[in-house]
Image: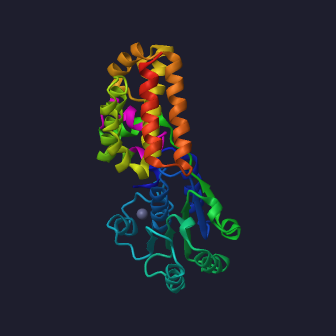
Amino acid sequence: MAFEEIIGQERLVDNLKKIIRSSEISHAYLIDGLKGVGKKQFAISLSKAILCLNTSRESIGSDNCTSCKKFKDNNHPEFHLIEQDGSIKIEEIREIQKNIHIKPYEGNKKVYVILNGDKMTVQAQNALLKTLEEPPGHSTIIITTNNLKALLPTIISRCQLLKLRPQGVERVANYLVEKLGINQEEARVTATFSNGLIETAKNIYYSEEFKRRRFKVIDIAEKLLSTNTMNILNEIEFFNAEKDDIEEIIDLFIYWYRDILIYKETQEDSLIINYDQYIKIQNQNKIIEFAKLRKAIMILEEKKQQIRGNVNYLLAIESMLLNLQDLFNNN
Ligand SMILES: [Zn+2]
C-alpha cells in the first residue's frame, strides 16, 4: 500500500512525506496506537516511502522506482521485518545489530521494523538501546506498540513518537464500501463493531467466527424471552467453548440490549449497531420494558467484572443467563 493510501492519518503522512523529501528522516520511530488502528500497515508503508528512490516526487513510495517494485514483491534486501508471536528475545535484536552496520546494497537506506516492540524482553530492549544511542547513518528503526508502558523510557525518548488515531466509524464504513465492495448495511455493522478501527473492521469482516458468535448471541437473546429453562441451560456449552473470549461475547449481548434501548428512545433504525437485525430489535422492543433493558445491561456488566475476578466461570454464566431469563419473564 502506498503511503498516501493510508486512511485517517493524513496529517501525519503529509508531515512524514515532507521529512522524507528533505532527507531529515529520523533514526528511530515509535508508532503508538490502539490494536486494530493499522500500525503494521503504517510501518510498512512508511518503510517503503523511506526506501523509495524517487523521494523528490509528490507520490513517494508509490512510484515505479526499482526500490518500490522490489518492496511490492516482498523482495527488498534493505527491508527487515521482525514479527513474533511470543516475546522478542535478545537474539533477534543481536541479528539486527549484526546486519545494521553493513552498508546498504541498494539505495542508501536500511529499514528495520519491530512489530509489537512492547513484547521485547528487558534484555532485548537494553540491547536495542545501544543501537538507538549510536545508530548508523543509513538506518531507520521503526517500532510499533499499543502498550507504551511496557517500553523502557530510555527507548521511548530515543524515538520520534508517531501517534495513530482511530479512523472513526464513518470513515471505516466508507472504506469498506469503496475499497472492499461491501454493501452499505454490512459495512455499517462491521465499522460500528470495530469501534472505528480499520484493521479491526477488516478482521471482523473476514472472520467467520465473529459472524457465528454474533448470530449465536442474537439467537440466545431470543431464547431468553421464553420461560424454557432447559433451552437456556443447553447454551452453557457454547459459553464453555468460548471461555477465552467471554468478554467479547458479553459485549455482543450488551450491544444487543443497548440497541433495543436506543430504538425504544429514538425509534430510529439508523442509530442501532445491529442494523441488519432491526426487525428483531423492533419486535423485542415491544416485549421488553425500558427498566428491564437497563437492568439487563447492568447484569451483563456485573458478570463481566465477576468473571474477570476469580469466580467459578460456569456458575457465573449460569446465573447470568437465569437472571436475564427471570428478568424478562417476571414482573
Ligand atoms: Zn519508489
Dominant SS in magenta: helix
Is any part of residue 264 visible from this angle? yes
Residue 199 location in percent, x, y? 43, 49
The picture quadrant for ligand 1 comes to bottom left
148, above or below 319, in the image: below
Residue 60 on image: x %, y %: 47, 58
Q: Quadrant of residue 268?
A: top left
Q: Residue at x 62, y 64 (%)?
A: 150
Q: Nearer the viewer, residue 282 or 150?
A: 282
Would residue 260 be counted in the magenta stretch? Answer: no
- Magenta-drawn segment: 182-201
Up-down: is 299 above or below 138? above
- Residue at x 60%, y 60% (from the top left corner): 19
233, above or below 134, in the image: above
Front residue of 330/206: it is: 330
Most foreground residue, 253 or 117? 253
Q: How is the image coloured?
A: rainbow
How many numbered markers are drawn? 0
- Quarter of the rendering occupied by the N terminus: bottom left
